[in-house]
Image (cartoon, rainbow, N blue to C red):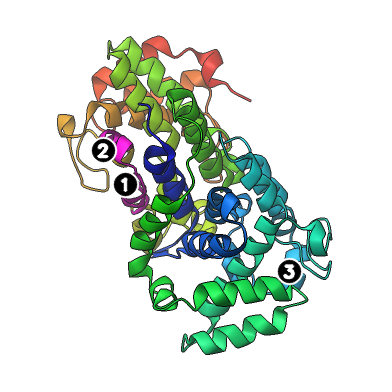
Amino acid sequence: MEKEHSGLFFETIRALSLMMDLDENEKLYHSWRVGIMSAKIADIIAPDEKREIFYAGLLHDIGGIALPDHIIHYHKIEEHFKNPIIFNHPEKGSSIVEQIPGLVKSAAMIKQHHEMWNGEGYPNRIKGSEISTGAQILRISDTFDLVNRSLKNQILKEVSLRLKKKAGKEYSHEMFEAWRKAVSEEGFYELIKDNDNLTQLMDYVIKTLPEMGMKMGLDAFDTIINVFAEVIDAKHTYTAGHSKRVADYSIIIAEAMGLNKKQVQKIKYAGYVHDAGKVAIPSYILDKKAKLTEEEFDLIKKHPIYTMEILSTISHLSDIIPIAGYHHERYDGLGYPNGYFGKRTPLGARIMAVADSLDAMTSPRPYQGIKTGDDAKKELKKYAGTQFDPIVSEAACDVLNCSLLAKK
């Protein structure tokens, strides 16, 4: 599995970026657009750092995943200073991204991407040339997308006028001129403002990046998948560690059932990313203590579909899509998203259904109390043959001890 960054590495980071930009029923593509715009500007003023700047653009808002709504909905700068999640998201994002092999420089840019040329940014109020070139590029690219979204009639001349007013304050006059030169290339603005063109632009950018200087082995891939899980679980305080625990439980059950090493590895990866689509579900629904309305539950039922859409952008993970996407199917056919029953649901998904339920039962949730390990096992036995595959349920009860389930 030794692939260069132009393949697996790019696909994985692109998918992580896409996941962050899910907003209920809409893909916002904010991070993709910032990444593409940043790479375009880097061609002009920082070609040697283009790769790091591009990936920093894709991941610049990763530290804000815990916000109830996507960060682009928080328009007022005053709110950025008052809301601790927003104020700290550059440093939080930097600490997440620096875990990814090859992106230490990108992490440093992310840390500064809300600093302003006049020193009135955050979190450290540095100014002028104290701000790295990469971070300055992220700043104007971020502002470009936000300004462009705010305009009813998206006309480059109007976008340019609004960004020019911010020159000397938010970014330097030289940075504004670099942006204007980049965006004015014939046809580029029409391409970047249309979501339908962004995949094509992303593929073009990746072909123009300098080589990464490292191979993408299993250890590096495992690190990125761990970051994926960390970001997913950061969306809600009560889900901290959930994805990793589901992966761990699934591995134990799969090994007890005699699955081979390759099958177990697929189930592990699926466990890490099985809830990727939940990022698109509004917090007020996931945090609701009362019974969900029919409309709210319908929205919940879409999250496996979103998960599969995200994973479909990573060619290496095509085999785990049905495992991650069908973990809410039931053995009796009353689950979702497809209502599959029995062995029509892949074995990996049936294993994950048990692992996911075990962790939900033994962890804090707004809508239920915490069950002991013994009580959780009783539930597995009670619903064997209806909610759960009875063979998987039996295997889980045999190998998962109560001390393991009584976490925290």
Q: Disc 2 on helix, strand or loop? A: helix
> Split into 4 quadrants, where in the image is the N terminus?
top left
Q: Earlier in the sequence, mark 2 or mark 1?
A: 1
Residue at x-position 63% and y-position 63%: 137
Q: Earlier in the sequence, mark 2 or mark 3?
A: 3
Range covered by the magenta-colored residues: 302-323
Mark 2 sits on what residue? Answer: 322
For this view, does 123 lie left or right of residue 310?
Answer: right
Mark 3 sits on what residue? Answer: 79
Res. 279 visible in picture? yes
Residue 91: percent from left, percent from top: 72, 48
Foreground pick, 182 / 159? 182
For this view, does 186 lie left or right of residue 392?
Answer: right
Mark 1 sits on what residue? Answer: 308
Residue at x-position 46% and y-position 89%: 153
Mark 2 vs mark 3, CA separation in Å: 41 Å
Foreground pick, 230 / 197? 197
Asked whether disc 2 touches disc 1, contact meaning CB atoms under 8 Å apart, the reply is yes
Mark 3 vs mark 1, CA separation in Å: 34 Å
Residue 266: percent from left, percent from top: 33, 26
